[in-house]
Image (cartoon, helix red, strand yellow):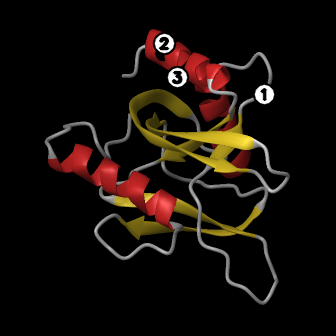
Amino acid sequence: MVPASELEALARRAEIDGTAPRVGVIIDRGGQVLLLERDDSGPIKVPLKLPGATVKTGESLAEAVARGVREETGLVVTGIRHHVGDFDYLSPDAHPVRRLHFAVDVVAFEPIHLTAHARYVWAPLDGQLPVTSSIRGILSAYRDLVRDGNPRAGSPS
């Protein structure tokens, strides 16, 4: 599990760098990762995304991870296994954002209750995933963690 001190250091670094922290969450069910599709009826197909949340003022990264997963999927996080990586980008209103990604354990993989998304898929990690290049990089880093012998990857709590 990721120690609280490491999570605090990540949050502090985002603050020092002047970026707003967001979290993205990898939920691995035996080599398949949970991806969400936005409820978007426009002509351009939007890539799938990982569950996640914007970190609220005064909220820890662990709290944001648990809240984001619960609000978007109904699943309950029992622990943060790994900090997988992060990337920076500009929000639509041109504010710097740092998206920190974590692999988590959950109580159970079902049932999933979507609140702000049209559907979900369990996509194989070894497939060509319909995600942004940034998320593809994060999932590649996660695959490397799993390949390098992490015994808890993909196992329910």
Frontmost residue, 6 versus 16: 16
**x and y, in percent, of residue 71 in the image:** 73, 43
Residue assigned mark 3: 10
Nearer the viewer's eye, disc 3 or disc 2?
A: 3
On the picture, is 151 further left or further right than 8? Answer: left
Badge 1: residue crowd in 10 Å (few <14, some 14–19, many ≥20): few
Residue assigned mark 1: 56
Above/below status of 113 relative to 133: above
| Residue at the image point whose x is 54% and y is 33% from the top | 77
On the picture, is 116 further left or further right than 121? Answer: right
The quarter of the image holding the C terminus is top left
Determine whether the residue tagged by mark 1 lies in a helix, strand or loop: loop
Res 58 quadrant in image = top right
Mark 3 vs 2: CB contact within 8 A: no
**x and y, in percent, of residue 51 in the image:** 61, 50
How many numbered marks does the figure carry? Answer: 3
Nearer the viewer's eye, disc 1 or disc 3?
A: 3
Determine whether the residue tagged by mark 3 lies in a helix, strand or loop: helix
| Residue at the image point whose x is 76% and y is 51% from the top | 91
Res 80 quadrant in image = top left
Residue type at the position of mark 2? Ala
> What residue occupies the far bottom of the structure in this picture?
43
Above/below status of 58 relative to 32: above
| Residue at the image point whose x is 64% and y is 50% from the top | 89
Q: Answer with mark 3 or mark 2, whichever residue precedes in sequence.
A: 2
Residue type at the position of mark 3? Leu
| Residue at the image point whose x is 37% and y is 76% from the top | 128
Q: Answer with mark 1 or mark 3, whichever residue precedes in sequence.
A: 3
Badge 3: residue crowd in 10 Å (few <14, some 14–19, many ≥20): some
Residue 4 badge: 2
The quarter of the image holding the N terminus is top left
Badge 2: residue crowd in 10 Å (few <14, some 14–19, many ≥20): few
